[in-house]
Image (cartoon, grey):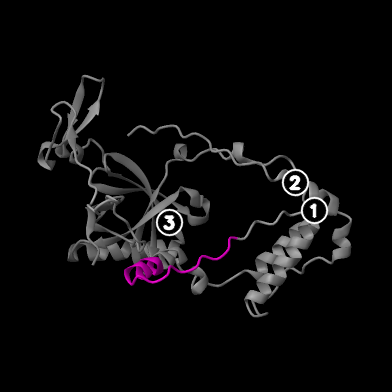
C-alpha cells in the first residue's frame, strides 16, 4: 500500500470530503550511488554549517528566507501548516471544465485520493458519480510544500485522481522555436496521415511500450556480477537526410506495415500516387533543407513561492 503524502479534505461548495493523498505512479528505474574508485567507499554528502565549519544533525536544521546576506527570516513547519489560505488544509474545487479544454503540457504528476474513513464514503462517491455523469473535470487549488498549486480532479476506475497542474505563467512561449516559413503540399500532408494510420494502435501496451533502457542497464549489471562479457550495443543509425519527403513517407509506410506483419488497423487515408506528388517535389526539398536549424531554449522566469 503506498504511503500517504498528504491528508486534508476536498471542498465542493458546502460539501466536505476528508481524504488521504497517495502516489498514483511508481518509479521502476535503476538508481546508482557514487563510490570512490580506489576502494569502492560510498561517497556521501554531509550538511556543513558554513559559519562553524562543522557537520550539523537534522534536528539543528530549519527553513528560512534570505532577505539579505546577513538577515534570514526563520520559517517553521507550524508556520507553513497554518498559512492564511483556504487551501492550506483543503483541496478547493474552483470550477468544472471539459478535459479537452486543458492543454496537456500543463498536467504534471498524478495522485490517488482515498476517502478518510466511513464518514467520507458517501460524499466521495457522490463526487465520483457526479464527475462521471458530467464528463467534466474539476479545477482545484491546494497548498503543498510551501506554495499554492493548481490541480485537476478526475475519475479513474471509480477513484478520484488529482493531477498537479502548472500555472499559466509557468508555460514557456513556444514562438521562438517555430521554424522558418515553409510550404507543405496537400500530397505530403496526406502521406503523413497515411503513415499515422499505419502506426495507430488501440492501447499503449505490448513490447513496443516497455522501458528498454532499464532492461539494458539490468543486463549490464547482471553481466558484471557474473563476470561475463557485456552485451553488445547495436550500431547507432545515422539519421538519413531527407531529400525527397514523399519518397521518405512511402518508405516509412511500407516499413510500418512490415513491422506489423502486413496487418494493421483500417486505412483511412490512402497514400497519394507518385505522379500527383511529382509536381511538388521541389518545394519539399526546400522544406527539408529549412527544417535543420537547432532549436533554441527559452529562458524561464523564476516563479515566486
Mark 2 crowd level (few <14, some 14–19, many ≥20, 10 Å Cα): some
- CA separation, marks 3 and 2? 43 Å
At a point 43% along the width and 56% down the height, the residue shown is 137
Can residue 268 be seen in the rendering of this structure?
Answer: no
- Badge 3 is on which residue? 137
Q: In this view, does 260 lie above or below 237?
A: below
In the rendering, which numbered label is found on residue 185?
1
- Answer whether labels 3 and 2 touch (C-beta < 8 Å): no
**Residue 90: x percent and y percent?**
26, 48
Mark 1 crowd level (few <14, some 14–19, many ≥20, 10 Å Cα): few
Q: Is residue 143 above or below residue 109?
A: above
At a point 44% along the width and 61% down the height, the residue shown is 134
Of residue 144 and residue 187, the one placed in the foreground of this image is 187
| Residue at disc 3, secondary structure | strand
- Badge 2 is on which residue? 289
Q: Sequence-wise, which precedes: disc 1 or disc 2?
A: 1
**Residue 235: x percent and y percent?**
58, 63
At a point 80% along the width and 59% down the height, the residue shown is 187
- Residues drawn in magenta: 218-236
- Looking at the rendering, which quadrant does residue 167 occupy? top left
**Residue 268: x percent and y percent?**
71, 70
Mark 1 vs mark 2, foreground winner is 2
Amino acid at each position: 500500500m503506498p504511503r500517504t503524502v498528504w491528508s486534508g479534505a476536498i471542498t465542493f461548495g458546502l460539501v466536505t470530503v476528508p481524504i488521504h493523498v497517495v502516489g498514483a505512479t511508481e518509479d521502476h528505474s535503476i538508481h546508482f550511488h557514487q563510490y570512490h574508485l580506489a576502494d569502492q567507499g560510498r561517497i556521501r554528502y554531509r550538511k556543513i554549517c558554513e559559519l562553524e565549519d562543522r557537520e550539523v544533525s537534522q534536528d539543528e536544521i530549519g527553513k528560512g528566507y534570505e532577505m539579505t546576506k546577513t538577515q534570514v527570516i526563520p520559517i517553521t513547519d507550524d508556520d507553513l501548516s497554518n498559512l492564511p489560505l483556504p487551501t492550506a488544509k483543503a483541496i478547493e474545487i474552483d470550477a468544472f471544465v471539459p478535459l479537452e479544454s486543458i492543454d496537456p503540457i500543463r498536467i504534471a504528476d498524478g495522485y490517488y485520493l482515498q476517502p478518510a474513513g466511513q464518514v467520507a464514503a458517501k460524499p466521495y462517491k457522490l463526487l465520483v458519480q457526479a464527475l462521471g455523469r458530467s464528463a467534466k473535470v474539476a479545477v482545484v487549488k491546494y497548498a503543498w510544500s510551501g506554495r499554492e498549486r493548481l490541480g485537476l480532479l478526475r475519475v479513474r476506475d471509480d477513484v478520484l485522481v488529482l493531477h498537479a497542474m502548472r500555472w499559466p505563467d509557468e508555460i514557456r512561449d513556444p514562438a521562438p522555436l517555430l521554424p522558418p516559413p515553409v510550404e507543405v503540399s496537400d500530397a505530403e500532408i496526406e502521406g503523413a496521415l497515411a503513415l499515422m494510420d499505419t502506426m495507430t494502435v488501440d492501447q499503449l501496451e505490448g513490447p513496443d511500450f516497455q522501458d528498454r533502457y532499464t532492461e539494458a542497464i539490468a543486463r549490464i549489471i547482471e553481466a558484471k556480477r557474473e563476470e561475463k562479457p557485456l552485451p553488445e550495443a547495436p550500431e547507432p543509425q545515422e539519421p538519413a537526410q531527407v531529400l525527397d519527403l514523399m519518397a521518405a513517407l512511402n518508405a516509412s509506410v511500407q516499413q510500418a506495415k512490415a513491422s506489423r506483419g502486413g496487418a494493421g488497423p483500417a486505412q483511412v487515408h490512402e497514400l497519394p500516387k507518385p505522379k500527383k506528388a511529382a509536381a511538388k517535389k521541389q518545394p519539399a526539398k526546400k522544406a527539408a533543407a529549412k527544417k535543420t536549424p537547432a532549436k533554441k531554449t527559452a529562458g524561464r522566469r523564476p516563479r515566486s513561492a
